[in-house]
Structures are given as C-alpha cells and as structure tokens.
C-alpha cells in the first residue's frame, strides 16, 4: 500500500515504514502543502502521516475518505475535524505521553528566561550594549517558593509541576474539569476555580488543548484578574491567548512578563512588538524538539500508520469511538 508523509520524519520512524514493504512518498519542499496539493497526494495514497500544520478539515476528509488511517506527528489534534473523521470511520492517531517531558522542559525554560529577562539580556550583547555594571539594571525576579498555577493539568502540566516542585519547592494549584489525583497526592497540587488560579498564581502555565472553550480565553479581562507581577507561560497553542490583549497587559504592567512557545499566527512576524519587550521570551514552537522525543514521536506515528493499514486498532487513537462497534473496526 501507499503512504504519504507531509514531512521527512526522524529515521527511527521512517525506518519502520521503509521496512514494512509499503511505498512511501515524502513531501520534500521547504514549504507547507497547499490544501489542493495535499488532496492530490492523498488521492494516490492509502495512509497519511501528517507532520506540521496541514488542516485535516471536513472538505479534505470528504475528498480523501478512502484513507485507511491518518497519523499525526503531534499530540495536539486541533488541526483535525475529529467529528468528520469519525463519521467517515477514518482513525486518527496522535503521539501522547512521549513529548510531555520535553514540552514541560520548554515551559520551565520559558519560566526562567522570562523571570530573568534572559532573551532581552542576550540581545543586549548582540547589539553591542553590554555596557557597564549597574546594580539596579536588568533585574529579574526569583521563582523559589512561589505559586505555580497550571491551566490544564494533564501529562505535560504534571511534568512541569513536578520540575517546579523539585527545583524550587513551588506550591502547585491547578484548574481542570476533573481532578488530577496523582498531582494532588504526589505534588500536593490543589484544584482551584479559574478565578482563584488567576488571582493566586505567580507563574501561570497553560497546558490545555485548543478547543472552542479555550480559544481566545486569555483575553484582557482574564489578564486583569491575574496576580500583579505574575508570569504567563503558554506552550500549548497560540490561539488560547489573545495576542493584542497580552501585549496590552504587558504594556500596562498588569503582569510581569510572558514566555511563549506558541503564537497566533505561526510563524510570528519578526516585527512583532512582543519580540522587543524585555520581560518576554518567545520560541518558535520547539516544545517537543529534542532528538529523543522526536524519535519516539516518529515511532508512534509510524506504528499508527502500520496498524491502520493492517486494519488493526491504532496504538494511540484520538477517535476511540470508531472501535466501539467491532463490526466497524476494519475499514474496507
Ligand atoms: C504537539 O505535539 O501538539 C506539538 O505542539 C507540535 O504541534
């Protein structure tokens, strides 16, 4: 059978696909595929491995309903119309778990970089402005003993909280729909209301999925409720915060600073005012970008593809419900 990859993936996963005997086609150009190009390629293939931002929307799915499986090279699946895929009985695979540690590392990195103005201080050297020592210049704030607020305490949020408790003895509060008993037992995390999270967090870190409920949630009204002097971290999805409102909150010093691994849109325009703010650290969506994690993600994505092509249940499937009726399990 034929497999289309929207990007070259790490060798660990690629090798599994190559050894499977299926025919592989990889999009090698250094640009995103146009929607029409994606459809054209998929019409000639039985499976799609999608790495990157390609929209897997209802129109695409309708045009490519022959696909036996779509495997994402990401844990997030907000780019996919899951309901449409489920209606068409196309299993969607993702890569949960393996990237939690690396993504939490990125949140931790941004927390420190923001609190110590690391990116702007580095820029000062590049610009020839090291200058002379001033006891009152370039001062950051310390993290030790402060309160970490986690919005969306799942696997990535747990790893971030674990690092913060271990490194700085931080108190952890969180806001979720359900309770995270593991975090409560192991880290002493306390579940609070959304307003309490905003009012009490010194560092507020976002680890929730992008959904209609979370889209644009962090707007000026929400930033106004955050603790003065606090830091906002987002390594989840850029559309969860309203960027113009975040800029306003920083300019009005409603909060101390912000660390972002995700922006809206991506890529961020290089003239964006956030990039010249001293208390802001922005990274180009590198949350899971380590050799170990990307290898592990590629292996999961490849296994999802191979299982889908064999008519088997995907090891990591988003739309579980397509297996509810066993008669539907194999897509003919
Ligand atoms: C993920 O896996 O969802 C990362 O954010 C990459 O998109």
Image (spheres, rainbow, N blue to C red):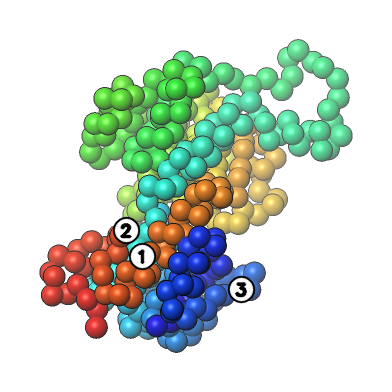
Is there CB contact under 8 Å for labels 2 and 1?
A: yes
Q: CA distance from mark 2 to mark 1?
A: 7 Å
Mark 2 crowd level (few <14, some 14–19, many ≥20, 10 Å Cα): some
Q: Is residue 286 visible?
A: yes
Residue 28 — which label?
Answer: 3
Looking at the rendered structure, the secondary structure element under dot 2 is loop
Mark 3 crowd level (few <14, some 14–19, many ≥20, 10 Å Cα): few
Is there CB contact under 8 Å for labels 2 and 3?
A: no
Percent coordinates x, y for residue 273 in the rendering: 66, 44
Residue bearing mark 2: 316
Of residues 119 and 288, the one nearer the viewer is 288
Question: Which label's residue is closer to the chain start, 3 or 1?
Answer: 3
User: Could you say which quadrant of the image residue 85 lies in?
Assistant: bottom left
Front disc: 3 or 1? 1
Q: Is mark 1 within 8 Å of ligand 1?
A: no
Looking at the rendered structure, the secondary structure element under dot 1 is helix
Give me the residue at 26% from left, 34% from top.
180
Q: CA distance from mark 2 to mark 3?
A: 26 Å
Question: Which label's residue is closer to the chain start, 2 or 3?
Answer: 3
Residue 304 — which label?
Answer: 1
Q: Quadrant where the C terminus lies?
A: bottom left
Give me the residue at 68% from left, 35% from top.
119
Q: Compared to 218, does 302 lie above or below?
A: below
Q: Quadrant where the N terminus lies?
A: bottom left
Question: Which label's residue is closer to the chain start, 2 or 1?
Answer: 1
Give me the residue at 56% from left, 67% from top.
8
Percent coordinates x, y for residue 200 in the rendering: 39, 22
């Amino acid at each position: 059978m034929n497999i289309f990859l929207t990007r070259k993936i790490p060798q660990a996963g690629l090798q599994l696909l190559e050894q499977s005997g299926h025919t592989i086609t990889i999009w090698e150009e250094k640009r995103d595929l146009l929607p029409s190009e994606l459809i054209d390629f998929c019409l000639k293939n039985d499976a799609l491995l999608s790495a990157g931002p390609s929209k897997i929307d209802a129109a695409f799915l309708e045009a490519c309903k022959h696909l036996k499986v779509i495997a994402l090279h990401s844990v997030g699946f907000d780019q996919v119309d899951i309901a449409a895929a489920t209606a068409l009985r196309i299993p969607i695979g993702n890569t949960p778990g393996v990237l939690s540690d690396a993504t939490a590392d990125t949140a931790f990195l941004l927390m420190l970089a923001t609190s110590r103005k690391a990116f702007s201080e580095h820029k000062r050297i590049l610009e020839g402005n090291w200058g002379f020592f001033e006891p009152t210049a370039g001062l950051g704030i310390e993290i030790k003993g402060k309160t970490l607020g986690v919005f969306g305490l799942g696997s990535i949020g747990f790893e971030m909280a674990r690092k913060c408790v271990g490194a700085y003895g931080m108190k952890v509060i969180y806001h979720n729909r359900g309770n995270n008993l593991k975090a409560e037992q192991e880290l002493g995390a306390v579940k609070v209301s959304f307003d309490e999270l905003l009012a009490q967090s010194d560092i507020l870190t976002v680890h929730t999925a992008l959904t209609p409920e979370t889209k644009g949630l962090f707007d000026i009204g929400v930033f106004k409720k955050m603790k003065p002097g606090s830091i906002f971290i987002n390594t989840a999805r850029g559309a969860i915060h309203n960027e113009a409102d975040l800029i306003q909150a920083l300019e009005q010093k409603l909060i101390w600073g912000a660390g972002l691994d995700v922006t809206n849109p991506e890529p961020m325009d290089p003239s964006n005012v956030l990039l010249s703010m001293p208390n802001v650290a922005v990274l180009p969506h590198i949350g899971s970008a380590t050799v170990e994690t990307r290898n592990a993600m590629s292996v999961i994505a490849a296994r999802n593809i191979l299982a889908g092509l064999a008519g088997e249940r995907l090891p990591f499937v988003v739309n579980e419900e397509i297996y509810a009726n066993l008669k539907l399990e194999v897509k003919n």
